[in-house]
Image (tube, rainbow, N blue to C red):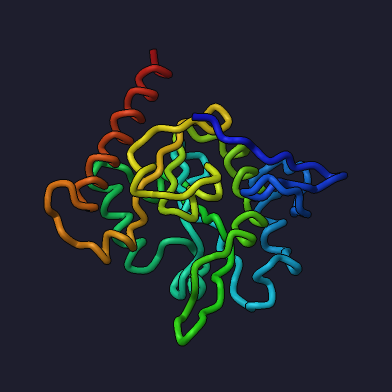
Amino acid sequence: MAASIPTINRKTAMTYDLFHQQQPAPGKDYRTLEDVFAALRAMTDDPLAEAGTKVVISRGNPQAKILLVGEAPGPQENIQGRPFVGRAGQLLDKILRAVDFDPEEDVFITNSVFRMPPGENGKAFRAPTAEEIAYYRPYVFAIMRLMDPWIVLLTGNVACQSVLGKRGITRLRGQWHTVEGRLVMPIFHPSYLLRNPSRAPGGPKALMWDDIREVRRKYDSLLQRRAS
C-alpha cells in the first residue's frame, strides 16, 4: 500500500497535513543527512521550540539498511539527547538483539517528533499533537530519502501517523506497506510492551516476536538477493 510523500522545496515550503490541507512546513532541498540534522538543531520556530526541550535526532548507524522511526523523546531522551535510551529503549535493543540485529550497527533510529512535548496535569510529558507530527514530517521523509534504507520500522501510532498518515497500531502491525519504494512495517512501541508484559500466545509480546522475526526474514532475503 503506497503512502503519499510530501514535497520539500525552497520556494513554497508547503506540505499537506493528515487531512490534506496545505500548511507551512520547514523545507529545503537537503543534500546530506548532516544537512537535515543541522536544520533540526537550528530550529527556533517549530511548534515545540518554546517548551525549551532538546532536539533529539538519532542514534545508530546512518549507513545501516534498517531505519526505525520512534515517536517523540521522553525525559531520559531529553536529558541524554538520543532516542530510545530509557526503559523502552533498553527493551527495544533486547528485541533487536534477539534476532541478531546490532542496535548500533544494523539499525538507524530516529523520531517522528524531535522535541519532547511538555507535560500536562502533573505528567512529565504528553503525546504529540497531529499538528506537531505534521510539522516535523518533512524532516522524517528527508532522513528516509537520504539514508535510503531497505526496511523502515514504525514503532507505535505516532510513527504510523507520520509516515503512513494513519493510526491503529493493533490493526497495522505486522503488515508490509510500501512508501517511496521502500518496505515499511509498523510494530508495537516498546513502551506498550512494558505496559502489557504478558507472554501469552496472541498477546503483544508474542505478536512483537512474530513481527521482528518477519523483519529478520525479509532483511535476509533482501541481503541474499543483492549478493546474488
Give me the residue at 32% from left, 61% from top.
192
Between 23 and 215, the one nearer to me in the picture: 23
Give me the residue at 54% from left, 27% from top.
181
Choose top left, top right, bottom left or bottom right for residue 114.
bottom right
Choose top left, top right, bottom left or bottom right for residue 197.
bottom left
Indicate the position of residue 55 as horizontal and vertical percent values. 60, 66
Answer yes or no: is residue 38 visible: yes
Horizontal relation, residue 88 to residue 9: left or right: left
Give me the residue at 68% from left, 45% from top.
20
Of the 4 image quadrants, the one containing the C terminus is top left
Indicate the position of residue 177 as horizontal and vertical percent values. 45, 32
Give me the residue at 49% from left, 67% from top.
127
Indicate the position of residue 145 as horizontal and vertical percent values. 61, 37
Q: Does 72 sit above or below residue 15? A: below
Q: Does 194 sit above or below residue 124? A: above
Q: Does 45 sit above or below residue 36? A: below
Answer yes or no: is residue 34 visible: no
